[in-house]
Amino acid sequence: MKASDEIFEKKQNLVHEILRTRREMGMTQKNIEAACGVKQPVIARMERGLTDPQLTTILKVLRRWARL
């Protein structure tokens, strides 16, 4: 497996965990937008796997949740 494929897979795993946690917490995509500043359409595309999100975008969400 290429390094770029491994990175993509790891990012997708993180996005999957973000989605799972968001649902467990009863949060909407708009709640995430308000909490961390990542726009709702970006979150929607990430969750549907329609984009290869920037690591900085994933980290914005994770940093905010670390403070909850």
Image (spheres, rainbow, N blue to C red):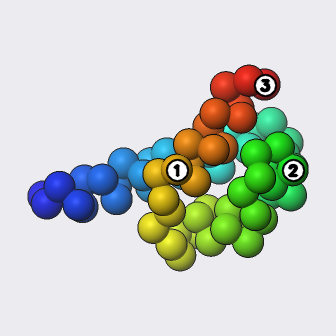
Task: Provide the residue designation for mark 2.
Answer: 34
Q: Are marks 1 and 3 in contact (CB under 8 Å)?
A: no
Q: Name the one closer to the observer, 42 or 23.
A: 42
Task: Provide the residue designation for mark 3.
Answer: 68
- Percent from the top left, x then y, of residue 40? 77, 65
Q: State which mark lies toward you, 1 or 3.
A: 1
Task: Provide the residue designation for mark 1.
Answer: 56
Mark 1 crowdedness (10 Å alpha carbons): few <14, some 14-19, many ≥20: few
In the rendered view, tell whether residue 62 sits above or below residue 29: above
**Residue type highlighted by circle 1:** Thr
In the rendered view, tell whether residue 43 sits above or below residue 55: below
> Please, what secondary structure does the residue beneath circle 3 have?
loop
Please state if 22 lies on the left or on the right of 49 as rendered.
right
Total marks drawn?
A: 3
The image quadrant where one finds the C terminus is: top right
Q: Does label 3 or label 2 sit earlier along the sequence?
A: 2
Taking the view exactly as shown, the residue that stands out farthest to the left is 1
